[in-house]
Image (cartoon, rainbow, N blue to C red):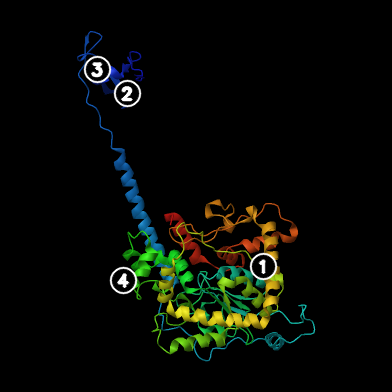
Amino acid sequence: MNIHTPAGAGGSQPACDWASLERSCFPVTAGRGSLGVRCGSGGERRGRASPPRPEVSEMPPPQKKRWESMAKGLVLGALFTSFLLLLYSYAVPPLHPDLPSTTPEGTPSCSPAPDESETTAAAANGSSPANGSSPGGCRPRRDIVFMKTHKTASSTLLNILFRFGQKHGLKFAFPSGRNDFAYPAFFARRLVQGYRPGACFNIICNHMRFHYDEVRGLVAPGAAFITVLRDPARLFESSFHYFGSVVPSTWRRLRGRADKLAAFLREPDRYYDPRGLNAHYLRNLLFFDLGYDSGLDPRSPRVQEHILEVERRFHLVLLQEYFDESLVLLKELLCWQLEDVLYFRLNARRAPAAPRLSAELYRRATAWNVLDARLYRHFNASFWRRVDAFGRERMRREVAALRRANERMRRICIDGGRAVDAAAIRDAALQPWQPLGAKSILGYNLKQSIGRRHAQLCRRMLTPEIQYLMDLGVNLWVTRLWKAVRDFLQW
């Protein structure tokens, strides 16, 4: 193999082969600093004395330039992130878990017009209006408060409410700037976009830390209050994987652990700091979302008092594990049609490679979330009493009808017929929000050719929460800013 050198003033230079390279070739500078190779034997070339060997100019190490560029990028990125986080902090009120911010006394609550009040009362009492739109004669209820809990299939239910409200031109109480009501701070009426004292809204459904009196003042007296619960051990597992990295005090202590979840559950007091940032995500999250103290002593009588208070305030408590049965009960409560409760599973996490909770870890997770466990046991029992009152055979028929309708929509709407990883989603408008440091949330691809009858419904059923909120006109500047930061830093 030969090395060919660039041409000089007197023609092309001779080539050197690898065998004689070490003893007879050396680099020289040839015109404008370019490097050539000069060959000879014993310092001579073709019998003539070799000219003095020029000094070789040293090339700057490429590694040094690369590290300098990386260092500059990191500094600029840190400054940019600090600025944006400072801006973000002005948009997010500080968390005072035990000090809810309430509307001043005497502030007018929702006061619906007389005809609206009559309609609301008729719907709440199940009476038959003259022009009832449902086969059973009841009037569909349009005033709904959905207390959206975390990691409970609540995003799927949110999509159902968005579609119903959009279809009927209802008025939503939306947050301003972001997709939740300043969570984890308590809900307050002033957090509602465009709020004015005395204003009435039909649907409230975004994430919040529940404050009953504040919420009640925004809806008509007969509004339906609903929420959804999940087996606390399974909820904890999902929350740990989704939110764990934003609980820095715990994540830092777990650094280096191959199985962080198992390590945490075996020694939770070692890794959990109840005063740490976002610590509420890792213990009794249902209790916290519902507005109660998630660190309450399980032996306190207040635990049962809170559970009974939830029962009094909410007309229906759905269960994530029995989602189809829950939707049948919801359809009955609200006097809706089957089409109103069709759904695709949204914001679902990709199945982990490792097995789910072992029996031992399941028991530990339940014990760690004991307040949620008591809450769930209570409403699991009341749920099945409600199913019995509805009729088990009737329930089986209606669940089967719902599943057939969902399957039909799946064949019509979803390209490939199933959820896919984020990287495989073609349309950015259908890309779900992802947790920090991972792309574990699945989404869908919409079929390219869908008939006009189903095109709009298919797209709405597949649209994730953030994009749907923007479609409904919500100002999400904080959420969009945070997304820009994450995209820039590739988080």
- Please provide percent x and percent y for residue 236: 45, 70
* Contact flag, marks 3 and 2 (Cβ < 8 Å): no
First-in-chain label (1 vs 4): 4
SS type, badge 4? helix
Q: Residue at x 50, y 85 (%)?
A: 307
First-in-chain label (1 vs 3): 3
- Please provide percent x and percent y for residue 134: 76, 78
Q: In this view, does 186 lie to the left or right of 315?
A: left
- Please provide percent x and percent y for residue 469: 58, 67
Q: In this view, does 39 lie to the left or right of 446?
A: left
CA gap, disc 1 to disc 3? 82 Å
Q: What residue type is labelled 1?
A: Leu
> For mark 1, does the 10 Å Cα neighbourhood hold few (<14), some (14 to 19), or many (20 or more) residues?
many
First-in-chain label (2 vs 1): 2
> Closer to the camera: disc 2 or disc 1?
1
SS type, badge 3? helix
The numbered mark at residue 342 is: 1
Q: Residue at x 28, y 18 (%)?
A: 19
The numbered mark at residue 31 is: 2
Q: Quadrant of residue 169?
A: bottom right
Say which of 87 and 264 sits in front: 264
The numbered mark at residue 270 is: 4
